[in-house]
Amino acid sequence: MTTTSTVRRATLPVLALVAAVLAAGPAGARTDETAAKAPGPLAPLIAASKKESGLVFYANAPAANLKLVTDRFQFYYPWIKTTAYDLDNNVIFSKYASEAAQGVRTADLLISSAPNLWVYATRQKFLTDYNPLELSQFPSFVKQYKGVFVMSPDPAVLLYNKLLLKDKVPNSVTEIANDPGTYRNVTGYTVDNLFGYTALWGYIQKKGWSNLEKIGKDRFRAQTGVAGQQSLVSQGAAVAAYLTSPTVRYNIKTNPQLGSILDWTYNKDATPLVPRGVG
């Protein structure tokens, strides 16, 4: 039976390579193999990683979105098998906690948009205190806690049915709140969705409660996740979703049927950035 501490020590070289790929940004999109073959600070990690069996991810990122990352990682390091599980934020941490307590194989990397659960994970000492190479090249907010980093600061966006709204594009939550004739049915998150909760909290710090109260009075249809919101808006049961996950952008871009019905835009009165953490 493999203990948690043993797994952590064994996978550190591989996790360092993951951090390098995540941090690569546009440079990571190159199609040559130079980065994987050239000697440099990663060379010892690459050599050590060839002794490892693979990586397990627990992530709240939709499988299709996360696949872009794991595919890129495997382009450079094809000998490292990656297994990713698309889980709700709460499940990511409860599953890890249960498995770690039993000393069985569990995730090597957690990815989540739940700030409160990262605090919990830090207090429980779930995370390895590790600083990726060239961390100093990134903004200071990237490091949230010891071993917890911002993988992406995700903007909460507006999703809308362009067939129903025709040439009208929603510019802000304020506009949606003040135009019940156009935005007669609107959807968004229930308070127990941690991305939604964080986005709403951020919005309220800037704009207060009044817009949300106007929408919530008789036009709001809450959904627990972005998939439900996307479904309501695409079917016409709601004309727009506010402060929703930016993962809808990828869905619209890659699904021609959705793209013919839906579009998205940034919220111009206040755009909360929800940190999708990795540790």
Image (tube, rainbow, N blue to C red):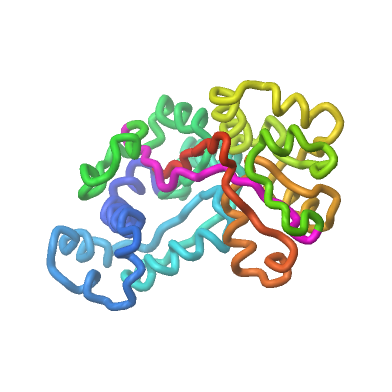
Q: Is residue 48 magenta?
A: no
Residue 261 falls left or right of residue 31: right
Q: Is residue 165 left or right of residue 145?
A: right
Most common secondary structure along the magenta stretch: strand
Q: Is residue 1 visible?
A: no
Judging depth in this view, the residue of 83 and 221 nearest the camera is 221
Magenta region: 146-163
Residue 257 x, y percent position in the rendering:
73, 70
For the C terminus, the image quarter is top left
The image shows residue 133, relative to residue 119, as above or below, that is: below
Q: Position of residue 150 (x, y in %)?
A: 40, 42
Q: Residue at x 48, y 27 (%)?
A: 120
Q: Residue at x 78, y 54 (%)?
A: 165
Compared to 228, does 37 lie above or below? below
Q: Residue at x 27, y 41 (%)?
A: 130
| Magenta segment includes 150 | yes
Q: Where does the image place residue 78, in percent across and percent down from the top left?
A: 35, 73
